[in-house]
Image (spheres, grey):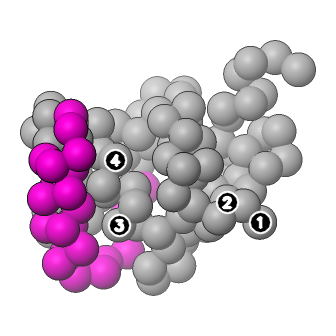
C-alpha cells in the first residue's frame, strides 16, 4: 500500500457537532469539531499546545465555544480548511494531521 493511501481523506460527512472522516485505506472515524479545533496547527493555535499547561488552557477555552457546523474548503490535494462562524478558522488541516487527530481523539467506526 502506498503511504499516500494511508492518509488520503476520501470523504467528510458533517453533522451538527461532529463529522465522519473516511480514509482511502478503509478506516473511518467519528471526530468532534472541538477535537479538531484543539489540534489546530495555525500560527496562533499551535504555540498554545507546546506543553501540558498551555494546552489545558487552550482546550478549556475551546470547550466554551458554541458548537457550530463548519464549512469545508479543499486546500490543494492534501488538506482542507474548516471555516467556523466564530473562533479560529485559519488552520490548514492536512489529511495526515486529521488522521493523527482522529486516531488520538476520535472513535474508529
Ligand atoms: Zn488556529
Q: Which residues are magenta?
A: 50-72
Q: Which residue is mark 1?
A: 109
**In screen coordinates, is 68 left or right of 12?**
left
Residue pushed farthest front?
53
Q: Is residue 67 found inside the magenta-colored segment of the image?
A: yes
Residue 96, percent from left and from top: 56, 32
Instruction: Please give left or right for residue 56 compared with residue 24 in the image.
Output: left
Q: Quadrant of residue 12?
A: bottom right
Q: Earlier in the sequence, mark 1 or mark 3?
A: 3
Give whichever of 104, 25 is nearer the camera. 104
Q: Is residue 74 visible?
A: no
Q: Is residue 38 magenta?
A: no
The quarter of the rendered structure image containing the C terminus is bottom right
Name the residue beneath numbered marker 2.
Answer: 29
Nearest the viewer among 20 and 107 is 107
Q: Secondary structure at mark 4?
A: loop
**Horizontal and vertical percent position of residue 98:** 51, 43
* Residue 39: mark in rendering: 4
The residue that label 3 is drawn on is: 34
Q: Are marks 2 and 1 in contact (CB under 8 Å)?
A: yes
Q: Residues within 10 Å of mark 3 (few under 14, many from 20)?
A: many
Question: Residue placed at 29% from the left, 37% from the top?
Answer: 41
Real-space CA distance between mark 2 and mark 4, rounded to the nearest whole angstrom: 16 Å
- Label 3 element class: helix
Seen at 23% across and 46% down, the residue is 52
**Spatial separation of the CA atoms under disc 2 and disc 1:** 5 Å
Q: Looking at the image, is mark 2 or mark 4 earlier in the sequence?
A: 2
In contact (CB < 8 Å): disc 2 and disc 4:
no
Amino acid at each position: 500500500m502506498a503511504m499516500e493511501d494511508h492518509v488520503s481523506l476520501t470523504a467528510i460527512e458533517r453533522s451538527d457537532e461532529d463529522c465522519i472522516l473516511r480514509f482511502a485505506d478503509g478506516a473511518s472515524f467519528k471526530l468532534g469539531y472541538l477535537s479538531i479545533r484543539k489540534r489546530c496547527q495555525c500560527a496562533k493555535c499551535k504555540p498554545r499546545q507546546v506543553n501540558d499547561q498551555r494546552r489545558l488552557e487552550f482546550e478549556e477555552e475551546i470547550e466554551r465555544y458554541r458548537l457550530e457546523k463548519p464549512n469545508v474548503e479543499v486546500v490543494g490535494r492534501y488538506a482542507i480548511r474548516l471555516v467556523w462562524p466564530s473562533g479560529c478558522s485559519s488552520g490548514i488541516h492536512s489529511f495526515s494531521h486529521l488522521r493523527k487527530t482522529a486516531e488520538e481523539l476520535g472513535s474508529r467506526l
